[in-house]
Image (cartoon, rainbow, N blue to C red):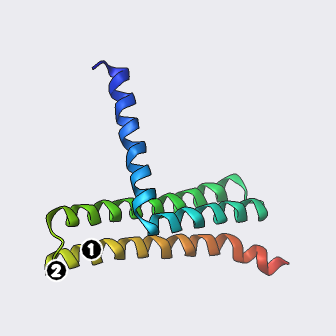
Amino acid sequence: MNFVQRVVFKFSCAFKGLHTALIADNSFKTHIVFLILVTIAGFFFNLNPTEWAILVFAMGLVIVSELFNTAIEFLVRMFTQEYHELAEKLLDISAGAVLFSVITALVMALILVVPRLLKS
């Protein structure tokens, strides 16, 4: 396989992973819906380029953390369908990471939007 074929293959794997997450994980779907709503709100509030960069970073943080959470969920299911204390801790910690990223993104969005709302 030459360089271009390897790059194309790696991108196809990445897109297949995104598709898998979108099909298999309701939380990922929910985050995508909110990503779209936040993007619409960004246009409504007429964000400047720096504010868009902050917003895109925040949205990316949430999506990446949810993708890792989904991957960890699949990994746990690969090894056991039964209750295991360590599996529960792993799943709880990865869910906590998503929660923390969502709270961080929400705070960042509020910092951008609240001043505009107070001006009106």
Dot 1 or dot 2: first in sequence order is: 2
Question: Dot 1: within a 10 Å radius of its alpha carbon, few (fewer than 14), some, or many (20 or more) residues?
Answer: some
User: Who's the residue at 21% across and 78% down the image?
Assistant: 89
SS state under label 1:
helix
Percent position (x, y) of residue 18?
43, 50
Percent position (x, y) of residue 59?
54, 61
Q: Closer to the camera, 58 or 12?
A: 12
Percent position (x, y) of residue 92?
29, 78
Query: Residue 25 bears which disc, if any?
Result: none
Query: Residue 83 bears which disc, if any?
Result: 2
User: Mark 2 is on which residue type?
Assistant: Tyr
Query: Residue 91 bears which disc, if any?
Result: 1
Mark 1 → mark 2, Cα distance in angstroms: 11 Å
Q: Is residue 32 above or below residue 16?
A: below
Q: Closer to the camera, 100 or 50?
A: 100
Q: Is residue 33 left or right of residue 4?
A: right
User: Mark 1 is on which residue type?
Assistant: Leu
Q: Which quarter of the figure has residue 67? A: bottom left
Q: Is residue 24 above or below residue 2?
A: below
Q: Is residue 53 left or right of residue 10?
A: right
User: Who's the residue at 37% across and 49% down the image?
Assistant: 17
Question: Dot 2: within a 10 Å radius of its alpha carbon, few (fewer than 14), some, or many (20 or more) residues?
Answer: few
Circle 1 or circle 2, nearest the eye? 2
